[in-house]
Amino acid sequence: MPKQEGQAGANRPRLSLHVPEPQFRPGDTVDFSYLTIPEAGAQPRPDYTSAAFETWPLCTDMIRVLGDDDLAHGPWDPRLSPEKLRELLRQMALVRAFDARMYRAQRQGKTSFYLKCTGEEATSVCATQALDFEDMIFPSYRQQGCLIARDYPVLEMVNQIYSNRADKLKGRQLPILYSAKSVNFFTISGNLATQLPQASGFAMASAIRGDSKIAAAWVGEGSSAEGDFHSALIFAAVYNAPAIFNVVNNQWAISSFSGFAGAERTSFAARAIGYGIAGLRVDGNDALAVYAAERWAADRARSNNGPTLIEFFTYRGEGHSTSDDPAVYRSAQEREEWPLGDPITRLKAHLIAIGEWSEDQHEAMDRALDEEVKEAQREAEKNGILGHGLHHPFHTMFEDVFEELPWNLEEQGRQAIRERQIKWPE
Amino acid sequence: MSTGMSPDDAPVTLAEAPARAMTMIEAINDALDTMLERDSDVVLLGQDIGYFGGVFRCTAGLQAKHGKTRVFDTPISECGIIGAAVGMCAYGLRPVPEIQFADYIYPGLDQLISEAARLRYRSAAEFIAPMTVRTPFGGGIFGGQTHSQSPEALFTHVAGLKTVVPSTPHDAKGLLIAAIEDNDPVIFFEPKRIYNGPFDGYYDRPTRPWKDHPDALVPEGYYSIPLGKARVVREGSALTILAYGTMVHVAEAVCREKGVDAEIIDLRTLVPLDIDAVENSVRKTGKCMVVHEATRTSGFGAELAALVQERCFYHLEAPIERVTGFDTPYPHSLEWAYFPGPIRVGEGIDKLLEA
């Protein structure tokens, strides 16, 4: 109710609520000139053993290595061999080929759901490549690149997406919520940001044991608003836990732009300052910068210098998932105008610029990768697609709730089998 | 008794083991000490549990004995405590987080319900969460509404989580050891009103200490009581009383005072439930009363009443009686008006006996 004259405080200015609104909506002309994109190579690189506060200028700057001239610049250049660069390129391209084919598979009715990471491939592939294989990955749902970077079989991924009889997760999880302990990849939750305090706990356990493994977690900028984010960072800071928190700032959380996670006020990396830990803001579409920043944080964690919060500044090139149509809430022009380009295109251009790659080689690689994914898909379809009967046996539904089957689940299992016999008497 | 064998070959039976009278706090401390000693994967974490030894003293002396990286304080963040424990499980540890009061656990629910309780299922057993969340619960200590709740039904509703409530020092130690050794997540509710004595519901009488109670005798060293096995507190034929935690002692006192030949079953574990013990007793007595301190609507008593009528309907001679706390928050000054004390329990018994 508005204040009435004569009421206490009637002469004070009225309060107003700020509800964030993105710069552009469908139909708007997109102009990203308001974003500050610093020159590649211009950012200082403190030693990884430095005090946390020395990184704080880097929380609002942006670490970039690949310049407009397609060459690597400055102290963050990880100086990777051409072989390694081609491996990063190949894995990012494989992720993109995989995404394209699985997206189509969902549209063809072979599964219920899919979710691409187009434009964000570097943030998972190159970051994972900077870790040791033994380091535990605590992913969110858009980190298929972490599995590809650890050479996890594409066939297993398709089996999971199809929830077929060869799905190692027994058809229990939504497509893309992988679990892959064999490559130190933690089971993905559908509840957001829960993996963050778990990464802190894993890192603490490794430190308790005097081990050398570290934990690396990924989270979207949108779900960094969860209380789990704070819990994770306060635990990591308090115990100086060997953990890395990668915030993939792809600008959009379904239809909510990053402003609803606080981006209008400060960067995501800047939250590190409040916890007194190291923070880095990184061009997430720059494969070399991503690799270099993650390696810096890994070296820091592994040498008992504590956790790091990294913000990968990137752009979600496609919709949130197959259940989403971004055309209704954001301008299609955004992706074209995105000032940091595309991570695959940029690394490819770099390799060509240093004389280690060619357009022909790239085309041949793309064809081979598409064939590789197609072959895995064909193989997976022999094990069934979603809803075509080739799922796991009924009783598996009741297994793994507990280590042992309690009496109530035994009874309910019998009920399920009875229902099945009524539905399909043969 | 001498068996002539080494202790490793033939452990003495529980009844033969050297024992001493303990409070429930000492018994819990002893269980934690035993498991820290036996299993290097066991770590304790929680608010104020380290140097100080916990607000109820359950972890007193354990940090000094086992070291700061086995027993340590945490930030005031239940989400962080349980979330970190899940991550420790992923590493291979067997954490025993303490939540200072069960009333404080809600910020940690997502980590417990969506994560710890679901890891085994969602990863097809690639990852498991063998953690035991210890937490004091229940009223009767003038804790007001944020230090008195009995939220067990929120947890028994969760697929993949076990729920345990001891009622004596002897059981507290054995059940806690079993919970820690269990490969599934367990929530272990400690009825704080009976930490120091077997409170019988007569708040206006002097409280008895544990030392004179037969179940305060706690065997030394390692032993475990299997989860999912109820205890017959007293055999009887007039009616069956299903209870757990503090209410076991209240029910026992009322039956003693009234001279009622009730069979009292201490459930000890709510999930998994010892359904055989429940069925056998109700079939024998034909009458059943369920008792808990928690609020009534959708309480665990409703589940028990449903199970009893599904399985024992034709043996029942009277409607199942539910005696519970009221459907209000736990009031501070009127906590004894809330508490299902001897009058409420007695009326329930009378009703069943008259039926």
Image: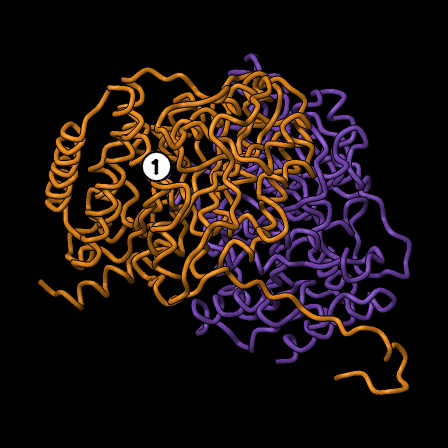
Chain colours: A orange, B purple
**Foreground residue among B26 and A377:** A377
Residue B336 visible in rendering: yes
Q: Is residue B244 above or below residue B86?
A: below
Quadrant housing residue A300: top right
On screen, residue A145 versus residue A134, left or right, reads: left
In percent of the image, x 31 and y 27: which residue is there? A350
In percent of the image, x 23 and y 38: which residue is there? A156
**Foreground residue among B13 and A61:** A61
Q: Secondary structure at mark 1?
A: helix
- The quarter of the image holding the N terminus of chain B is top right
Bin the neighbour count of mark 1 within 10 Å (Cα to Cα): few under 14, some 14-19, many 20 and up. Answer: many
* Residue A313 percent coordinates (x, y): 47, 41
Residue B40 visible in rendering: no
**Foreground residue among A101 and B276:** A101
Kindly identify the amino acid type of the residue bearing the numbered disc 1: Pro
* Residue B98 percent coordinates (x, y): 67, 40
Q: Is residue A340 above or below residue A331?
A: above
On screen, residue B111 versus residue A265, left or right, reads: left
- The quarter of the image holding the C terminus of chain B is bottom right
In percent of the image, x 8 and y 62: which residue is there? A426
